[in-house]
Image (spheres, grey):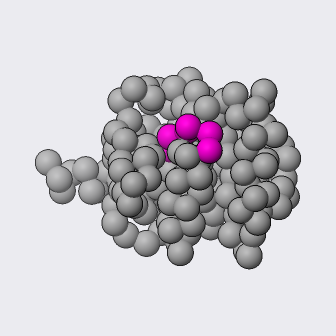
Amino acid sequence: MKYLEFLHIARKLNDRLQVTPLLFGSLGLEKRLNVSLNADDIDVLIPERFIKEEWSKLMALMEDEGYCLIDHEEHEFEKNDVHIAFADIEGLEPFAGVHISDIPVITESGTRYYLLELEEYLKVYTASSKDGYRKDVKNKQDQAKIDLIENTIKIGK
């Protein structure tokens, strides 16, 4: 259900804002691995200008889709217990060394979005495991994902 909601919002981002979002976090990893990781929310990376200068455009789009802003600092919206949080895609390279130009674009049902490869997810979760909040709060979850990614990469080679 969360993935279908992501596709719906991604289509709106494509059409109304001419944005190709990146499906991030556990839901993106679920899609890449084709396994359920019980993602809590939908994490989406978009161009920074929509988080800063053009925030009103993103707000209007999400409100038109029935979402309410529940955390301005985290750019998190909620509708019917589905949470979608936005962050800037430009932060990916300094945070985890992942270059935007290296991320493949997926087209599904006419909707375009970016999806990290396993090697890129490994960089992200490794960097996340060193982050203060995630290190203290999500360390076991992050380590389990790192182990899953590493094992999947080994099997694939």
Residue at figure coordinates x 73%, y 44% from the top left: 58
Residue at figure coordinates x 83%, y 56% from the top left: 69
Identify the image quadrant of residue 51.
top right
Q: Is residue 149 left or right of residue 52?
A: left
Residue, far left: 157
Residue 147 lies, in percent from the top left, at 38, 56
Residue at figure coordinates x 55%, y 38% from the top left: 19
95 magenta-colored: no
Residue 35 vs 58, above or below: the answer is below
Q: What stretch of residues is rendered in magenta?
A: 16-22
21 magenta-colored: yes
Residue 62 vs 126, above or below: the answer is below
Residue 122 can be seen, yes or no = no
Residue 12 can be seen, yes or no = yes
Residue, far front: 15
Residue 115 lies, in percent from the top left, at 41, 46
Count of marks, rendered view:
0
Residue at figure coordinates x 50%, y 60% from the top left: 7
Pick whichever, 150 or 57, lies toward us.
57
Q: Is residue 6 left or right of residue 145?
A: right
Residue 53 lies, in percent from the top left, at 78, 27
Residue 50 lies, in percent from the top left, at 70, 34
